Image: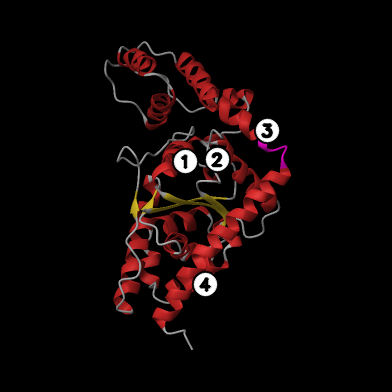
C-alpha cells in the first residue's frame, strides 16, 4: 500500500484554501492509502519564532483535522515536534543540501521580501525540513497546493541525491497527488493571490468562522467598478471571487453570475451575498463538529498521544536504516 504524507502549519486555523487544496481529499485517501497527517509546529517557527499561543493553535488545527473527517483509526495524525526522528533526518539531509539551490527557491525569495527583519536559517532550509517530513515515512504521494510544487521537486532532489551518494536506492520519489489530477489553488479575498493567514486575516475564510464573520469578510472583498464592455476580461480581484464561487456554488449559480458579468449587468453586492451563503452552507457541518470537539480535551489529548506513538514507530525504522546506510552503525 502506498504511503501519503501531508501537513498543515500550526500558525492558524484551516481555511478554504487548505480544505479544497488538499484536506477535502483526505477522507477518501484513508480508504486506499497508508496516511500520515501532521501538524507542522516546527515549520511555524520560521515566521513566528516566539509563539505566544502555540499550544492553542496546535490544538485547534488538530480539532479541525478531525472535524473535516480524518479518522484516527484509519490514519496517523500527529504533531511534528512529537517525532524527533524528523529533526534527525532534517540534519542528515541538510548536510547534502546546497546553499545556492536553497537560495533560488521561490518561496525563500518571497519570505525574505515579506519579513526582511527575520531572514533566519530556517527559512532557507524550509524545503529540507519539508523533505524530511515526507521522506521519514518514505511517502510516494503528497497532497500539496500549486505553491508547494517546487518544494516537492526539491524533496525528490534530496531523496535521489541521498540514494546516489550512498549507492542505495532507499528513498522513493514523492509526487504531488490530487484526485482530479489538478492541483487546486484557492484564491484569497484581497485580490492578490492565494488564500492564507500569512496574507492577512481578511484574506482567508476559515472553517471555524461564524456566519457573521464570513459575511463581513466577503462583503469587504476587493472588486472594481464593474465591466464596461461585453465579455470583458475580469481583473484579478474579481476573478478571485468567481473562482471561489465556482468551488462552493452550483454550476447553475456560477453560470448565472458569469452571464451577468459578460452582459455588463453584474451587481457585485448580489455576487457577494450569494458567495457568502454558499460558503456558510459549505462550512456549517464542519463548524458544528469543531465546536463539539473543542469541548472534549481528554479525547484530543488521547488522539495526539496515540498519533505520536504510531508516527514515532514508523520514523524510528527509517532513521535506523538511514544511519546504517550512512555509516553510523558503530
Q: What label sits on residue 110 in the rendered view? A: none
Q: Which residue is mark 4?
A: 88
Q: Nearer the viewer, residue 295 or 233?
A: 295
In space, the residues marked 1 and 4 are separated at their CA atoms by 27 Å
| Residues packed near mark 3 inside 10 Å, few (<14), some (14 to 19) or many (20 plus) | few
Q: Are marks 2 and 1 in contact (CB under 8 Å)?
A: yes
Q: Position of residue 193 (x, y in %)?
A: 42, 39
Which circle, 2 or 4, is nearer the viewer?
4
Q: Is residue 268 visible?
A: yes
Residue at the image point whose x is 42% and y is 42% from the top: 31
Q: Are marks 2 and 3 in contact (CB under 8 Å)?
A: no
Q: Which residue is mark 2?
A: 14
In space, the residues marked 2 and 4 are separated at their CA atoms by 28 Å
Magenta residues? 292-296
In space, the residues marked 1 and 3 are separated at their CA atoms by 20 Å
| Residues packed near mark 2 inside 10 Å, few (<14), some (14 to 19) or many (20 plus) | many
Q: Nearer the viewer, residue 222 or 241?
A: 241
User: Which sits earlier in the primary sequence, circle 4 or circle 3?
Assistant: 4
Q: What label sits on residue 292 in the rendered view? A: 3
Q: Nearer the viewer, residue 57 or 241?
A: 57
User: Which sits earlier in the primary sequence, circle 2 or circle 1?
Assistant: 2
Q: Which residue is mark 1?
A: 23
Q: Residue furthest left?
A: 231
**Residue 182 located left or right of residue 329:** left
Amino acid at each position: 500500500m502506498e504511503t501519503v504524507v501531508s501537513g498543515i502549519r500550526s500558525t492558524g486555523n484551516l481555511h478554504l484554501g487548505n480544505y479544497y487544496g488538499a484536506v477535502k481529499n483526505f477522507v477518501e485517501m484513508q480508504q486506499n492509502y497508508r496516511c500520515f497527517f501532521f501538524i507542522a509546529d516546527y515549520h511555524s517557527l520560521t515566521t513566528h519564532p516566539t509563539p505566544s499561543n502555540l499550544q492553542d493553535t496546535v490544538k485547534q488545527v488538530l480539532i479541525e483535522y478531525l472535524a473535516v473527517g480524518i479518522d484516527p483509526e484509519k490514519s496517523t495524525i500527529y504533531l511534528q515536534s512529537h517525532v524527533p526522528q524528523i529533526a534527525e533526518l532534517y540534519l542528515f539531509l541538510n548536510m547534502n543540501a546546497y546553499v545556492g539551490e536553497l537560495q533560488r527557491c521561490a518561496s525563500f525569495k518571497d519570505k525574505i521580501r515579506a519579513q526582511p527583519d527575520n531572514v533566519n536559517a530556517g527559512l532557507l532550509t524550509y524545503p529540507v525540513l519539508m523533505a524530511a517530513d515526507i521522506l521519514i515515512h518514505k511517502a510516494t504521494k503528497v497532497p500539496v497546493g500549486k505553491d508547494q510544487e517546487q518544494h516537492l521537486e526539491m524533496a525528490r532532489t534530496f531523496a535521489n541525491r541521498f540514494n546516489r551518494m550512498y549507492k542505495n536506492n532507499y528513498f522513493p520519489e514523492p509526487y504531488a497527488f490530487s484526485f482530479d489530477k489538478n492541483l487546486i489553488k484557492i484564491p484569497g479575498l484581497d485580490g492578490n493571490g492565494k488564500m492564507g493567514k500569512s496574507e492577512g486575516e481578511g484574506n482567508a475564510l476559515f472553517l471555524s468562522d461564524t456566519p457573521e464573520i464570513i459575511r463581513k469578510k466577503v462583503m469587504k472583498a476587493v472588486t472594481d467598478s464593474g465591466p464596461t464592455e461585453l465579455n470583458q476580461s475580469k481583473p484579478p480581484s474579481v476573478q478571485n471571487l468567481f473562482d471561489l464561487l465556482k468551488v462552493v456554488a452550483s454550476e447553475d449559480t456560477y453560470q448565472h453570475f458569469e452571464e451577468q458579468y459578460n452582459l455588463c449587468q453584474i451587481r457585485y453586492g448580489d455576487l457577494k451575498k450569494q458567495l457568502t451563503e454558499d460558503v456558510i452552507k459549505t462550512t456549517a457541518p464542519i463548524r458544528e463538529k469543531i465546536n463539539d470537539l473543542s469541548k472534549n480535551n481528554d479525547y484530543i489529548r488521547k488522539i495526539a498521544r496515540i498519533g505520536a506513538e504510531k508516527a514515532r514507530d514508523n520514523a524510528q525504522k527509517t532513521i535506523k536504516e538511514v544511519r546504517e546506510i550512512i555509516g553510523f552503525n558503530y
